[in-house]
Amino acid sequence: MNTPTRISTLALRHVIPHPFAIDQWAEVRPLIDGRDVLAEIHAGGVSSCSRGDWFGPAEGWPLSAHEEPRRVELSNNDCHTGCCGGVFVTIHRRDDEVVWSSWQNTNDIRIPVPADVRFDAAQYDAELRRAVADTGWEEPVDTVARLVAQELVHSGWFERWDCVVDRVEPRREEPAGVEVYFRRRGAAPHDPGFTFDLPVTGDAPAEEQARRFITRVTAGDPRETAEPL
């Protein structure tokens, strides 16, 4: 008699990084059947699925599953995995399932990695959408960073000034704030670009602070009002 294939459940949990972490966006940590699998096989590592990578269309989300298998970095040592190692998995959509296979732990090859994990595709996709919509975990700096990123990065505002956004980042180290880095389109590699810096406080609603920053940035040519790097 054939043994039924085990179907696991995916849950995603947001974790606020420490103020001196390289990536200041919240970690998005995968839980498989309620277990933080990264904590088990890469203790002390951080999730490579940063909240800052979850904007835009669903097909571009870090854990999105496609018919074409792709290798995904799940964790790192708050460092580049080519230097310090991490955990990797191949994500593949097969009909009504999503499969995580070919696990690798380049942080410590002595630690056993999970066997293939199968998820119900509908539950998997629903959990990704739920996590993206979830803002209940946010601190003020996260809310401001999210609203600024959604408005400035995806509105095409910088493109009209022949510029491109490199990144938007929350800053948790005091004084907390949000930083927007951009540069001229086609700038030479040595061109450092520009930055806007918005201090974020607990004295005003995060939404109000975000609106104020967006108004400041979109008041005119950003190349004339931003700080050169």
Image (cartoon, helix red, strand yellow):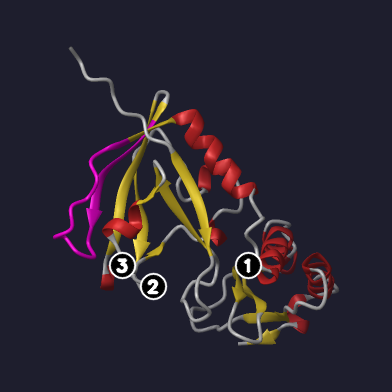
Judge whether residue 107 is colored magenta: yes
Separation of residues labelled 2 and 1 (CA atoms): 26 Å
Q: In front here: 175 or 81?
A: 175
**Identity of the residue drawn at 34% across and 59% down:** 39
Task: Tell which circle, 1 or 3, labels the residue nearer the N-terminal end.
Answer: 3
Q: Mark 2 points at which residue?
A: 78
Quadrant in the picture for residue 223: bottom right
Separation of residues labelled 1 and 3 (CA atoms): 27 Å
Start-end of magenta stretch: 98-117
**Identity of the residue drawn at 83% across and 67% down:** 211
Separation of residues labelled 3 and 2 (CA atoms): 9 Å
Q: Residue furthest left?
A: 110
Task: Tell me where residue 45 appears, x and y as whole percent.
Answer: 35, 67
Count residues near mark 1 (Cα–Cα under 10 Å), then give few for <14, some for 14-19, many for 20+. many
Determine which of the numbered discs, if any, sits on residue 81 in the image.
3
Judge whether residue 158 is colored magenta: no
Name the kind of residue labelled 1 in the image. Answer: Val
